Image (cartoon, rainbow, N blue to C red):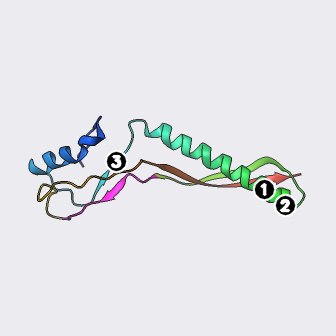
Amino acid sequence: MLRVNVGDLKRLGEIVDVVARAGAVIADSLSIGVSDEASARRHALEAAGKDARSKAEALALSTGKQVDDAVAIAEDIVASNGVYAALRSVVPFAFGAGTPEVAGELEYYARVSASFRLK
């Protein structure tokens, strides 16, 4: 595994090409992340927890109840969209027009399961 920290994502394709020309073969995937991944994951979990409570409140209201304290909360998954399948399994990226650019935002998402008391 090779880890390269890049401050300017606009240069990512160029850097991957340089690494490939130096002999590296990207055989499985290319991962893109943030420097403070723990914070990004924590924010995703907080948002998922708030969403779970909001949905529970809507469901409780539909039955004439109110949500009370959480009884159990479990993290099902916290992940990001930062893993891209390599275009070639054996041939390095450094051929033809070079490494394709991937546009968009890096998103972290979480899924939680929660149980609440009703009152």
Query: Mark 2 Cα within 10 Å, few/some/many (few <14, many 20+)?
Result: few
Residue 62 circle label? 2
Residue 103 circle label? none
Tell me which amino acid carries mark 3: Ile
Q: Do residues under tags 1 and 2 come within 8 Å of each other at their CB atoms?
A: yes
The location of residue 103, given as percent across then percent down, is 34, 51
The residue lying furthest to the bottom in this view is 89
Tell me which amino acid carries mark 2: Ser
Left/right of residue 96 with respect to residue 107 in the rendered view: left
The residues colored magenta run 80-89
Q: Is residue 48 magenta?
A: no
User: Sequence-wise, which precedes: disc 1 or disc 3?
Assistant: 3
Q: Secondary structure at mark 2?
A: helix
Rounded to the nearest whole Å, what is the CA distance between mark 1 and mark 2?
A: 6 Å
Q: Secondary structure at mark 1?
A: helix
User: Sequence-wise, which precedes: disc 2 or disc 3?
Assistant: 3
Give the residue displayed 22% in from the left and 48% down from the top: 13
Tell me which amino acid carries mark 1: Ala
Q: Do residues under tags 2 and 3 come within 8 Å of each other at their CB atoms?
A: no
Give the residue displayed 78% in from the left and 53% down from the top: 57
The prevailing secondary structure element of the residues shown in magenta is: loop
The residue beneath circle 1 is 58
The location of residue 104, given as percent across then percent down, is 39, 50
The location of residue 110, given as percent across then percent down, is 55, 52
Residue 32 circle label? 3
The location of residue 39, given as percent across then percent down, is 49, 37
Q: Do residues under tags 1 and 3 come within 8 Å of each other at their CB atoms?
A: no
Front one among 103 and 35:
103
